[in-house]
Amino acid sequence: MASAIGRVFKWLGVGVLFLIVGLCLAIVLVPPFLDRIYYRGPVSNHFDGQRFFNPDGEDTLRPPAGRSRGGFLLRYLTGSDDRPEWPEHVAVTPSRPPARVEGQRMLVTWIGHASVLVQTAGLNILTDPVWSETAGPLGFGPRRVAAPGIRFEDLPKIDLVLVSHNHYDHFDLPTLKRLWDRDKPVIVTGLGNDAIMRSRGIESIARDWGAVVPVRGAEVVVTRNHHWDSRWFTDRNRALWSSFVVRMPGGNLFFAGDTGLGDGKWTAEAARYGPIRLALIPIGAFRFEPGQMGIGSHIGPIDATKVFAGLGASHAIGIHWGTFRLSYEAYGTPPRLLHETMRCAGYPVGLFDTVTIGRPIEIPAYAPQPKAQPLGSDCLASPAVRALR
């Protein structure tokens, strides 16, 4: 009897999953109902008059594992891709940052995923703020395994918010609305994303790559990276994705947002705006099948190390891991692989590393990045690397 009931529930579960997949496919096949026009403007080398694109080549359209998108979604939803286990909950001790950090001192707190509080020069800067429990529409999507490293009510007054693109794990409208209502910060983002925010009564400054926005003694430069965006499947690339350079006297802050490597030349473009004291670089959600080290739209630790070198940054923190489960790799793989990759490149320990959610860290003054050695395949084929899933 029990086994029969179990089979019934199993088939009901499979039926629900197929219904979800069917609805997703229906959404893709009926674009007029969910497509949105967020931006209208002149054609450029990354905008065709209707949609944005990566000028260094488009490799973000195919599914992450290289197979059918429907099959990928079904395997992901059912957990049938033999993915490593993740913890259901990670303990976090939230901190209470100071109201301001003056002068050239820089205090940084990783809140989780791509959300980081940077305090320096009297400015409180917040990147891709997400305090919601899930990263998806209407409460659906991946659920947090780690609480925010700063409770929202403990946030100091925020002066500047950088929003890299409109994916739900980076563009959280409930959080942005709370920030806007409380602090009225300057919100800088790429073209088109302002229309989405404006629909919720949030004002922002949307600019193209290369544009400069002055903010209280600093300058925000909207810079190129390599990604894509969408809120509703069919509105793909109606708005622009970006990275950012915040130019400051003590050395610049670079926020990569969410990115693949592409041609990699965008790192040198960002470096031309001045020496980078701190870079926030994604290292997670890179493996969607065993052994994969990166995809078109996400870099793993190996490509992240190349980004670090290209930027010439003095220090870097690995972000975009350990908060929402978005891919195949084990929970601890991104920081472990980053450590091995930096060792293979011959960098001193600590220049590009991960930090604990909620623990404030002091960023040293800018110093030129030491010269690295080429990443050899023998080093990255070590037993320590091969053991990572």
Image: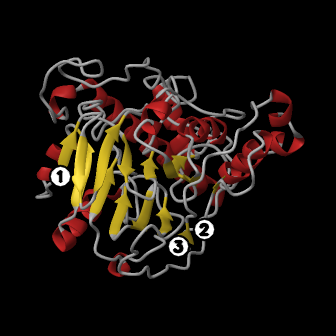
The residue under the point 46% across, 60% down is: 143
Q: Which mark is residue 358?
A: 3
Of helix, strand and loop, which one carries label 3?
A: loop
Amino acid bearing label 2: Thr
Horizontally, is 346 left or right of 78 in the view? Answer: right
Of helix, strand and loop, which one carries label 1?
A: loop
Label 1 belongs to which residue?
204
Choose the circle earlier in sequence order: 1 or 3. 1
* Local crowd size for mark 1, using a 10 Å CA cut-off: few (<14), some (14–19), many (≥20): many
Q: Residue 243 appears in which quarter of the rendering?
A: top left
Q: Quadrant of the N terminus?
A: bottom right
Q: Residue 96 appears in which quarter of the rendering?
A: bottom left
Residue 101 seen in the current view = yes
Residue 46 location in percent, x, y?
30, 22
Label 2 belongs to which residue?
356
Q: Are marks 3 and 2 in contact (CB under 8 Å)?
A: yes
Horizontally, is 349 left or right of 62 in the view? Answer: right
Q: How is the image coloured?
A: secondary structure
Q: Is residue 294 above or below residue 182?
A: above
* Local crowd size for mark 2, using a 10 Å CA cut-off: few (<14), some (14–19), many (≥20): some
Amino acid bearing label 3: Gly
Residue 216 location in percent, x, y?
24, 61
The CA distance from mark 1 to mark 3 is 27 Å
The CA distance from mark 1 to mark 2 is 30 Å
Horizontally, is 157 left or right of 369 in the view? Answer: left
Amino acid bearing label 1: Ser
The CA distance from mark 3 to mark 2 is 6 Å
Of helix, strand and loop, which one carries label 2?
A: loop
